[in-house]
Image: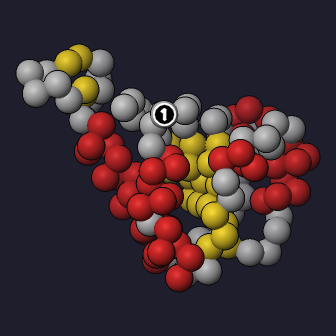
Amino acid sequence: MSVVSDNSVRNENGNSNEELYQQSKEDVLSAVDRNVKTIMLVGSGGNGKSHLTNELKSVLESNGYVIYSPDTSYSWKEADVFLENMNTVEKKVVHLLFDPYLEWCIAPSIDTAMVMMNGIRW
């Protein structure tokens, strides 16, 4: 990453945090439009997952999504706990610190949208 004169951080592809955040927002809204069962916001801490969820809270809730608090979904540190929660029937938004499919070598769920937010640093 390099710092440009206006103090906005850009990643190796030249995208600013704001651009990456807006792309993540568009990805979530697209998943809502497609009526995806589970939306996962994935990335290390401090990259805007909670902020994005709070910003879109009314849209998510009006479309029937249950928003899991990060405290809840961050505690899913075992594959069986994660899979049990993924198999619930309600539509949901979860925050995760890592990609669970890579971490546990499990197949991704078909009706899931994963929004990768690792490149964002505030």
Q: Residue furthest left?
A: 5
Q: Position of residue 15 (x, y in %)?
A: 24, 35
95 with respect to 83 (left or right)? left
Dot 1 lies on which element?
Answer: loop
Check the picture and name the quadrant holding the N terminus: top left
Residue situated in front as seen by the camera: 41 or 104: 41
Instruction: Give above or below for 70 relative to 5.
Output: below
Q: Is residue 112 visible?
A: no
At 69% from the left edge and 35% from the top edge, which residue is drawn? 102
At 84% from the left edge and 53% from the top edge, which residue is drawn? 83
At 24% from the left edge and 35% from the top edge, which residue is drawn? 16
Instruction: Give above or below for 22 relative to 9.
Output: below
Callout 1: few (<14), some (14-19), or many (20+) C-alpha neighbours within 10 Å?
few
Instruction: Give above or below for 108 relative to 76.
Output: below
Q: Residue furthest top?
A: 2
Instruction: Count the numbered circles shown.
Output: 1
Q: Position of residue 108 (x, y in %)?
A: 71, 52
Q: Is residue 77 visible?
A: yes
Residue 30 quadrant: bottom left
Q: Amino acid at mark 1?
A: Gly
47 with respect to 23 (left or right)? right
Q: Residue furthest right?
A: 80
43 with respect to 74 (left or right)? left
Q: Position of residue 78 (x, y in %)?
A: 86, 38
Residue 20 quadrant: top left
At 47% from the left edge and 75% from the top edge, which residue is drawn? 58
Residue 52 quadrant: bottom left
66 with respect to 16 (left or right)? right
Instruction: Give above or below for 10 relative to 75.
Output: above
Residue matched to label 1:
46
Check the picture and name the quadrant holding the C terminus: top left
